[in-house]
Image (tube, helix red, strand yellow):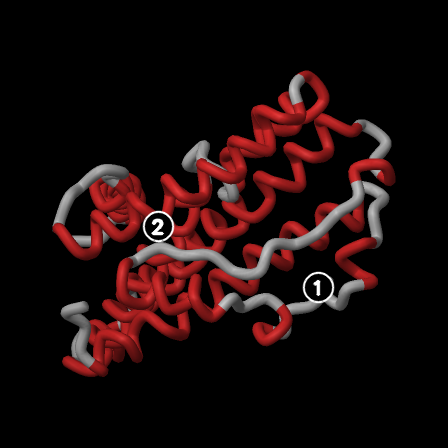
Amino acid sequence: MGLDLVEILKIAPAAVIGLTVHEFAHAFTAYKLGDDTAKNEGRLTLNPLKHIDWLGFFLIVVAGFGWAKPVSFNPNNLKHKHRDEILISIAGPLSNFVLALFFFLIARLLFSVDFFHGATWGLALINLIMVWGLINFSLFIFNLIPLPPLDGSHIYLTFLKDIHPITMMNMYKYGTMVLFAIIIAESQFNINILHISEMVGSLSSFFIQLLGFR
């Protein structure tokens, strides 16, 4: 796949943190909105072993995007069904956005200290933290793609399942297949379909300039 051991060791911690926080955000939001399904399944935790899907973890390490085990919730326990389902869905990507900003801020604080940015190892640490931020921006953007089973699809599927449940089931069935086909095509044939890297680059550049990095 083109990644060496050093690159994997850089990416893996951010993937574990990003995927864990992402799924915890889903579970926490559902719990706060009145559904304790995820809590009863042991998902209201920051323990990575409760959240990591090893195929999704592998893909994020080698391809730059992936997923974790989906968090279950019961819409019948929600007070405002459609609104709350959407809030639960977007909580995961938003948590990655916040986490990316957190890593960027930490990197900026370290960069402002001579002890860090004046040494080679210090710059390497700052760059590593920036990479972790970029990975979480990737998770944020990737999960907003409106293809099942990604979070972005729930914005319209939460309404579609009441209007036409068969269409929703087909969307899940074929949307997942389409997503896998896109991932394989991008990683194996160097075809840029989703343009995630460009969007991540634009987003990160904006915050790099905002934070005053040279």
Judge by depth and name the residue closer to the eye, 48 or 156: 156
Helix, strand or loop at mark 2: helix
User: Could you tell me which quadrant the N terminus lies in?
Assistant: bottom left
Judge by depth and name the residue closer to the eye, 156 or 11: 156
Helix, strand or loop at mark 1: loop
| Amino acid type for the residue under numbered disc 2 | Ser
Image-based side of 25 in relation to 62, left or right = right
Image-based side of 181 in relation to 79, left or right = left
Give the x, y percent position of residue 183.
30, 50
Q: Residue at x 72, y 26 (%)?
A: 82
The residue that label 1 is drawn on is 43
Residues under numbered marks 2 and 1 in contact, where contact means CB atoms less than 8 Å apart: no
**Where 194 falls versus 54 (above or below)?**
above
- Mark 2 neighbour density, 10 Å: few (under 14) some (14–19) many (20 or more): many
| Amino acid type for the residue under numbered disc 1 | Arg
Give the x, y percent position of residue 184.
26, 52
Asked whether the viewer can see residue 1, the reply is yes
Residue depth check, mark 2 versus mark 1: number of the one nearer the observer: 1
- Disc 2 versus disc 1: distance between alpha carbons? 23 Å
Outermost residue, top side: 163
Q: Earlier in the sequence, mark 2 or mark 1?
A: 1
**Where 80 falls versus 188 (above or below)?**
above
The residue that label 2 is drawn on is 138
Give the x, y percent position of residue 37.
81, 54
Give the x, y percent position of residue 122.
24, 78
> Could you say which quadrant of the image residue 57 lies in?
bottom left
